[in-house]
């Protein structure tokens, strides 16, 4: 910035539209849904500004209607990945020198494009690709992505304003350089907003990026790419490749210029990537930054003083919205004996009232799970629970993949607090409940803390402040996002920075300044105005 200390628009959260019957937004999204459903698009890769088609294609289908083709995408060869790396490094020469206000302008424009002309399209694409209801699509692909873009621009300027003290004889300047090399962004299927944010946050800070979206999200990723291009992201700054994750990753991690991993996905994949980076460490010009937000086994623990209806609503929403495929979804619950009859009755009534089907029918609360692999895995855990003596299914338990990958929302009650579905991340509409003796509160909090490898989100319900305080203390390390008398899902950018520790990730808090710090390498510049001309200090006299 040469000619002014510019201020960016103050970031505000994008208001969530309600899509009530008769509303203009409902009409627009249903029209966009129909159009995209029939469009049969062919999605190229984007490498150095070029659309690249290899002819090695795969089909995209809605999870709720797997026989229908939405179109195809092209899978990368190793040469494509290499040319994406080369293109990124070439683009870096100009992009890393681009003044920050120009970068800000591009991503603020992207936010406004999503808020306006692309809103219906990005929501409809997310409903089709990931089987989200309109409300789940709106809070993700429209509002959260807009918020990420707006707030990150503001956070960037706050970081740039952080400067050291200077004395009268010298001027100390901190320059927040992008990393030297390129960033590898790998994104999960479940949030269109995360898919957009992982490459965009690094690019905003002046980095160049190679982005590999999840196969199951490419249909909605295409809308993000269109928005970035229209907003003016220059060629080569964000390169997009699809296909075999192992080949792509092996090629990327061989590059001496690999300087950072921005990952969201499962714990096992992240740990294997970290290991591979470690094994390659002598190849790199710089120590790569490694950021990974990964799996969860998120809990709700209720105290005997809790309000049963609040607890059951938190379970019904927290465990089952988006078919339990949020990393923050409640999947293990601890309910005191005295509260259990009421919570049980209410949860069963809620689950029985859920309508299941395509998101195009907006009265459906539950749609399909993402793909056949996920469906089969969930079905096998449900079958095991039917057979196991220490588990009982109190509602749900059916599944059907004839048309779409539909799993009935399922509640398992177990007498074994370490039962497999209390520990393993299933990532679907299955929640497991352990009922404890009322007077075992403290012991139960320790059980919550010591069960499983994760520490992403968790919620405590209580009307008793002493009990709440105990939970806050004992569960200090059990969740990176901790909720009091609220469900453990639904973090909002700028309000609840998101991320967990232990097996759940590096906790770099997406949607906060903390994350942006990972994509910069500060340079300290000290300028002395009148330089000394004699080495002798006074004490030598
Ligand atoms: P996933 O790990 O299967 O895939 C994530 C990405 O990694 C995809 O792009 C995939 O193609 C890629 N990938 C898979 N194997 C790879 C390999 N061997 N090398 C390199 N890349 C590879 O996860 P998913 O099913 O897409 O998403 C669900 C997971 O993500 C859950 O575990 C969930 O908890 C987690 N998640 C976490 C957060 C968070 O903020 N903590 C947010 C969203 C999702």
Image (cartoon, rainbow, N blue to C red):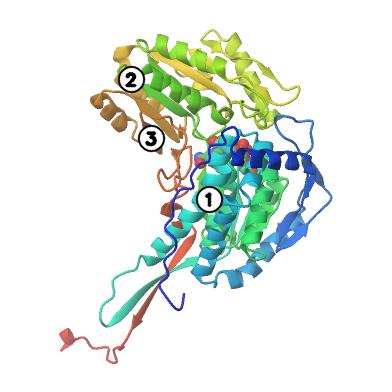
How many other residues sit within 10 Å of disc 2, few (<14), some (14-19) or many (≥20)? some
Q: Label 2 to label 3, Cα distance in Å? A: 17 Å
Residue 306: mark in rendering: 2
Q: Is residue 24 left or right of residue 412?
A: right
Question: Residue 146: which numbered mark, if any?
Answer: 1
Q: Is residue 241 placed above or below 492 in the rendered structure?
A: below
Q: Circle 1 sits in a helix, a strand or a loop, which is it?
A: helix
Front position among marks 1 and 2? 1
What residue is pinned by disc 3?
Answer: 482
Is the distance from the Cβ of mark 2 to the nearest ligand 1 atom less than 8 Å?
A: no
Camera-nearest residue between 62 and 14: 14
The location of residue 142, given as percent across then percent down, is 56, 45
Question: Residue 228, position in %: x, y?
Answer: 63, 58
Q: Can residue 280 be seen in this view?
A: no
Kindly report which numbered mark, 1 or 3, lies closer to the viewer in this rendering.
1
Helix, strand or loop at label 2? It is loop
Outermost residue toward the bottom?
Answer: 533
User: Which circle's residue, 1 or 3, is located before the other in the chain?
Assistant: 1
Image location of residue 352, percent across then percent down: 56, 14
Task: Report the mark closest to the observer, 2 or 3.
Answer: 2
Q: Residues within 10 Å of mark 3 (few under 14, many from 20)?
A: many
Q: Which residue is drawn at 51% across and 72% down?
A: 99
Q: In which quarter of the image is ligand 1?
A: top right
């Amino acid at each position: 910035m040469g000619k002014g200390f510019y201020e960016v628009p103050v970031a505000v959260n994008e208001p969530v539209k309600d899509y009530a019957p008769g509303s203009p937004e409902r009409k627009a999204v249903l029209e966009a849904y129909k159009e995209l459903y029939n469009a049969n698009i062919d999605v190229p890769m984007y490498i150095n500004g070029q659309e690249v088609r290899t002819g090695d294609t795969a089909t995209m289908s809605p999870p709720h209607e797997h026989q229908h083709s939405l179109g195809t995408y092209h899978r990368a060869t190793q040469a494509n990945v290499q040319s994406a790396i080369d293109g990124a490094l070439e683009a870096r020469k100009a992009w890393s020198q681009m003044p920050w206000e120009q970068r800000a302008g591009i991503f603020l424009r992207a936010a406004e494009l999503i808020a306006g002309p692309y809103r219906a399209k990005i929501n409809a694409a997310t409903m089709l690709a990931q089987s989200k209801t309109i409300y789940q699509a709106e809070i993700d692909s429209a509002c959260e992505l807009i918020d990420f873009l707006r707030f990150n621009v503001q956070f960037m300027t706050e970081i740039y304003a952080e400067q050291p003290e200077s004395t009268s004889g010298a001027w100390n300047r901190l320059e927040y350089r992008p990393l030297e090399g390129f960033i590898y962004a790998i994104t999960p299927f479940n949030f269109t907003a995360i898919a957009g944010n992982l490459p965009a946050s690094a690019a905003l800070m002046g980095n160049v990026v190679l982005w590999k979206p999840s196969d199951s999200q490419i249909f909605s990723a295409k809308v993000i790419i269109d928005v970035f291009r229209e907003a003016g992201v220059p060629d080569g700054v964000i390169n997009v490749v699809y296909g075999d994750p192992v080949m792509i990753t092996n090629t990327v991690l061989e590059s001496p210029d690999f300087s950072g991993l921005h990952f969201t996905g499962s714990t096992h994949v992240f740990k294997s990537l970290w290991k591979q980076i470690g094994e390659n460490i002598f190849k790199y010009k710089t120590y790569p930054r490694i950021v990974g937000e990964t799996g969860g086994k998120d809990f709700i623990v209720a105290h005997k003083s809790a309000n049963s209806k609040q607890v059951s609503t938190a379970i019904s929403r927290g465990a089952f919205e988006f078919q339990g495929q949020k990393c923050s979804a409640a999947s293990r619950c601890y309910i005191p004996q005295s509260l259990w009859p009421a919570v049980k009755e209410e949860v069963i009534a809620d689950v029985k009232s859920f309508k299941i089907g395509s998101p195009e029918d907006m009265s459906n609360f539950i749609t399909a799970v993402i793909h056949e692999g996920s469906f089969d895995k969930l079905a096998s855990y449900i079958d095991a629970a039917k057979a196991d003596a220490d588990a009982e299914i109190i509602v749900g338990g059916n599944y059907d993949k004839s048309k779409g990958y539909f799993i009935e929302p399922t509640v398992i009650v177990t007498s074994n607090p370490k039962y497999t579905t209390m520990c393993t991340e299933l990532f679907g509409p299955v929640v497991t409940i352990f009922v404890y003796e009322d007077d075992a509160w403290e012991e139960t909090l320790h059980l919550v803390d010591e069960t499983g490898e994760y520490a992403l989100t968790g919620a405590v319900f209580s009307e008793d402040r002493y009990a709440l305080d105990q939970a806050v203390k004992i569960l200090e390390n059990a969740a990176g996002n901790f909720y009091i008398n609220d469900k453990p899902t639904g973090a909002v950018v700028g309000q609840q920075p998101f991320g967990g520790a232990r097996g759940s990730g590096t906790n770099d808090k997406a949607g906060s300044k903390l994350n942006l710090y990972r994509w910069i390498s500060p340079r300290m510049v000290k300028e002395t105005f009148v330089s000394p001309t004699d080495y002798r200090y006074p004490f030598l006299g």
